[in-house]
Amino acid sequence: MKRDFIHYNPEDKLEFVRHYENKETQESYGYVLEKVKSLEDFYKKDLYDFSFEQIEEAMYKLSPSSLPVARMNGAVLTSYISWAIDNNKRVSNINPIKSKINTTDWYRRFVDPSKKNYITLEDLEKIEKFVTNYQDKIVPRLLFEGVGGVFASEVLNLTSKDYREENSKLRLNDERKGERYIKVSDDCITMIKSSLNETDYYKSNGFSESRNPVLKLVTNNFVVKTVCTNDKSEGKADRHTVYRRISSIAEWLEIPFFTTKSIQKSGMIYMAYKLIKEQGKSEIDREIINQVAEQFNVSKIGNQAYNYSLLEEYINLENINKLYEI
């Protein structure tokens, strides 16, 4: 576990998450369970003894921003209750929400409309877990962390020579603005390495029923690759590859607002949130906006200053509070 969680009945919660070997799974499941602690305190009982109506209340409290996040929240609660039943901890041996696992309308009712148009880092991580190909995972991750460029040229030009694992730095090349360097997360670097090493591409996120459901990727040093065709070019992807992969994820997960622009803006909001916490500030000042704009290579007005009024339309405390509850 990366950090301590404050849970109701913490011994059971920790025992549950630790039966998963994957550390990321432990972290994300523990985070979901932490967010329903106030309801457990109110009802004076553990989540695994909740009635169906109380579980629905917990699902509302988790306020997911999209249908897939609601489904993932439900999967965590279902798994926890099933684990409790298997370990003779729940009073009843019936899991009240197991029958709802494939009921789209039930999950849709819990989606918080106030969060539409933007995703949180947690949303992105859950989306990444659903997506099969690293070639699909890497595109929104790069956009969220500041890699963009004119017609996504920074994403498309990124190669195996452009990252430094020891300090998580990327060298980027925008075909209009030129070269620059930024720091990204360790998770982003790990995903870049996985994308470079990937050789197969599973059509329709692994659910294709076509005769050839798996395609070979071009062997080259680009992070974002194309599939093999009869084309004898170097195999560098074009901007339509980026847009198509984003729109495919939006279609698979039913997130209509999942676009390159919304992902970039979501990343900017998250970075501003991180800077507020790190710098101990209570508001977003020009210094924070400058740092965010530099990371995302925002154009200046006449090469003098950023368009603060435009940036503040979405980089603001209202959006941060909606998404991260500071």
Image (spheres, helix red, strand yellow):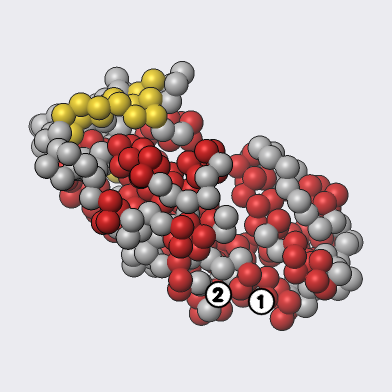
Q: Is residue 34 above or below residue 100?
A: above
Q: Which mark is residue 282?
A: none
Figure quadrant of residue 216: top left
Residue nearer the viewer, 83 or 8? 8
Figure quadrant of residue 4: top right
Mark 2 surroundings: few (<14), some (14-19) or many (≥20) residues within 10 A: many
* Quarter occupied by the N terminus: top right
**Percent x, y for residue 294?**
30, 37
* Residue where numbered disc 2 is placed: 110
**Percent x, y for residue 45?**
85, 68
Please tell me which residue is depicted at 75% across the width and 62% down the height of the picture. Answer: 37
Instruction: Tell whether label 1 touches label 2 (CB within 8 Å).
Output: yes
Which element is circle 1 on?
helix
192 left or right of 147? Answer: right
Q: Amino acid at mark 2?
A: Phe
Cα separation between marks 2 and 1? 8 Å
Figure quadrant of residue 189: top left
Q: Is residue 135 above or below residue 107?
A: above
Q: Is residue 161 above or below residue 115?
A: above
